[in-house]
Amino acid sequence: MLELKNISYSVEDNGVKKDILKDISLTVDERFVVITGPNGSGKSTLAKIIAGIIKPTRGRIILDGEDITDLSVTDKAKAGISFAFQQPVRFKGITVKDLISLAAGKKISFTEACDYLSEVGLCARDYINREVNGSLSGGEMKRIEIAMILARSTKLSLFDEPEAGIDLWSFNSLTRVFENMHQSVKGNIMIISHQERILDIADKIVLLKDGRIRQIGTKEEIMPQILGATGYCPQIKE
Amino acid sequence: MTLDKIQLDLLEKVADLHGVPSGAYNIRSNGTKAGRNTTANIDIVTKEDVDGIDIIIKPGTKNESVHIPVVLAESGLQETVYNDFHIGENSDVVIVAGCGIHNGGDAASRHSGVHRFFVGKNARVKYIEKHYGEGDGRGERIMNPTTVVELAENSYMEMETAQIKGIDSTNRKTVAKIADGATLIIGEKIMTHGSQVAVTEFEVELNGKDSSTHVVSRSVAKEDSQQKFISRVYGNNACNGHTECDAIVMDNAKVSAIPEIKANHTDASLIHEAVIGKIAGEQLIKLMTLGLTEKEAEEQIISGFLK
């Protein structure tokens, strides 16, 4: 279980203090918790704070009763937090197998690699020895990023907009991955997303706006708020 | 042939050899011939005018290899060796050269190798060269390899060079002339540390119609080391040339890339790319979110980059 207690984060911009996150308190103890809200509401910043990439200005982060606020990125990862980036990182010379092995914390066999990759719709034969460089498409990178989180299988898995750029692979597959992942790992899964299909599987939805929690609730309770918060425009065609 | 432990270790580092190789070979140790084997298709002859050997590969020789490692374990040894490779038409061979220096003394050890390749029509050559230095003496380990390549019509040569550790100073020069339909691929890997200096210079003349070259240098410069990458590609006919310098710079190291691409023909298509910079912060952070420390992440990124 992850607990966020009064998390705030502010930056100085040309000498002017700007609050990015304001007094966020939240418990993540369900299967799927989805964080949603308009662009610039602070969702990605919140994920980076949980993963340790950004230090909060104020507040505490508690994982299974242990205060992990001051731990480094490495130690937070070891404590049981995984983080799938919104924009996966490319590496020259490092292969898909290398990355999944690093994620799993041990050398993995072809069969194990196949288990993780087939889960995200990639054939291990075609991908295992590919370099994670510019030759892979954005969609392929996103799927490999998810396979790495599967290989880590930690208490808390954080996904920052996992659906963005997931080419032909359908949302159905993506939601199935999350469901299977919960079954096998039994951890908590926290997803940042705008997509209704992802909101559908959420046990709890947190709506952020202007760095504050606007509302916490079920999809039925939150949907009307989302349409209001994102500034629904009747002229934009779906 | 008897080699001691130090010499055998060096041999393994530069030629991946555990003892005597199969096929044709010539092992040079501390300035003298330590072993040689020839085959029906590959002859090795000692030069009479200068120090060095001629390696003669008969036309049509397929799937054979030649190993010509050099090891220097005597401090203060300085030598220049001339090796010529005559590669017959339609052959397909692998050549492994390399030099390992163990300098446990205070005098500088220097090996300068001049390798010339005369590659016949339609022949294919893979040339692998590794340089390695070790030893705790204060004497410098210096290597200055020169490679001269002449590719005849429709021949193909792939050259892989690596200098990963222990060479204090290197001045590497590669000059090539490429005929119609021939291709030269060069992949170079360099890592320098301490106060090492590496200069690497390529000059490729694309003389033939539909000739091509791809020169890629990947390097990592650490601590106070310095590297300079110079590449010149001249397109004298309808041809394709591509040079690429990709360097990671760390600590107080300095790297410079000086390209020259010159089209002397309207159908010459030439590209130069150079990227120099530190390890991207997001790469370190990604690996740290997998539980690696910053140092472990850095090692992974570098070893992948130079793989």
Image: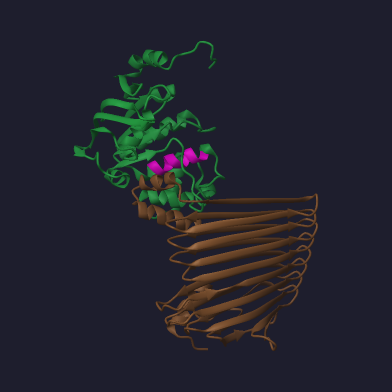
Expressed as whole percent of the image width and height from the top left, the position of residue B96 reads 59, 73
Q: Quadrant of residue A211?
A: top left
- Pick the front one: B263 or B126: B263
Q: Is B71 rendered above or below residue A220?
A: below
Direction from residue B215 to residue B208 in the image, left or right: right
Q: Colour of chain B?
A: brown
Give me the residue at 48% from left, 31% from top.
A164
Can residue A112 be seen by looking at this rendering?
no
Residue at horizontal 35%, vertical 25%?
A: A202
Palette colour of chain A = green
Q: Position of residue B25 (x, y in %)?
A: 60, 80
Outermost residue on the top side: it is: A234
Residue A70 falls in which quadrant of the image?
top left
* Residue at the image position 38 percent from the left and 41 percent from the top: A149
Left or right of B196 in this view: A203: left
Q: How many marks?
A: 0
In percent of width and height, residue B55 lies at 68, 79
Assess whether residue A146 is covered by the magenta stretch.
yes
Q: Is residue A166 above or below residue A124?
A: above
Q: Residue furthest front?
A: A15
Judge whether A228 appears above or below B248 on screen: above
Check residue B229 for magenta coloring: no
Boundaries of the magenta span: A140-149
**Left or right position of B276 against B6:** right
